Image (cartoon, rainbow, N blue to C red):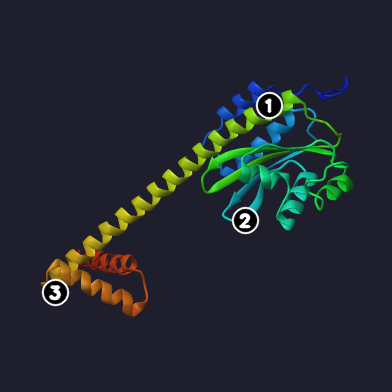
Amino acid sequence: MWTTSPSTPPALGVRDAFAELGRVSFEETSMEALLQEVADLSKQVMPSVTEASVTLITGDRATTAAWTGQLALDLDESQYASGFGPCLDAAVGQELREITDAREETRWPDYTPVCVERGALSSLAVPVPVREDIHGSLNLYATEPHAFDDVARDTGREFASYVAVAVRNIHLYETTRDRAEHLDAAMRSRAVIEQAKGILMSQRRCDADTAFTLLAGASQRSNRKLRDIAQSLVDGVSGQSTRLD
């Protein structure tokens, strides 16, 4: 049931919402910001939605990564506390879960009274297939019963599938960036360790293996990282060279 009053601003079109997500720059947007954009846009796309949220489940822990209002957050957390509910079932079971009228719903007897009390009489939980080890759900809450028709369900599925691609892409970007940063740091560490080994080989007239053993021993005795020991040695020699000059 999709109705709007003359004073209600027109809902954002689905394609317009997708276009907005498509303009998101992975370099400038965090996962949290992207998911918040998802929640905000889903509320705008479907005028029957009062509040929206995004649930992510990693391992056995469920969290609300983004929400548009306190109602959505409270209803999500009510499900997490009891360990069951439509958003958890949708995320793990990868099937859409709908409550058409919370006053008549019997599948989640401990949860639906909370919905009625908070005035959320219908809801739609759409699975977001992120990755094998991460499950997600786009949660749409409405104050009216029977708020979602076939068009709303199809829109929710289409929106969630696009969201899944966007989340996977930004996760891949963040993972690749982190790996690149770690690789860069490792290469810098290796470079300074090689410099320190060269200094010790010159000073002690020893081979590379012996020089590394000396560095490792100093690291263990001082309880400092090997790279820090190597950097101190390199800095010390550089300082000495400067003074001699």
Q: Is residue 28 visible?
A: no
Q: Which residue is disc 2 drawn over? A: 61
Residue 233 spot, x, y in % from top left: 27, 69
Quarter of the figure with residue 231: bottom left
Which element is circle 1 on?
helix
Which is nearer the eye, 193 or 64? 64
Q: Name the residue under label 1.
A: 155
Mark 2 vs 3, N-terminal side: 2
Camera-nearest label, 2 or 3: 2
- The reply to whether residue 110 is in sight is yes
Q: What residue type is labelled 2?
A: Arg
CB under 8 Å between discs 1 and 3 = no
Q: Distance between the residues labelled 2 and 3?
A: 55 Å
Residue at label 3?
Answer: 204
Q: Which residue sits at x=38%, y=47%? A: 180
- Tell me where residue 238 appears, x and y as whole percent: 25, 64
Asked whether, in this view, residue 25 is left or right of residue 103, the answer is: left
Whole-angstrom CA distance, mark 1 to mark 3, is 72 Å
Task: Give amino acid for label 1.
Answer: Thr
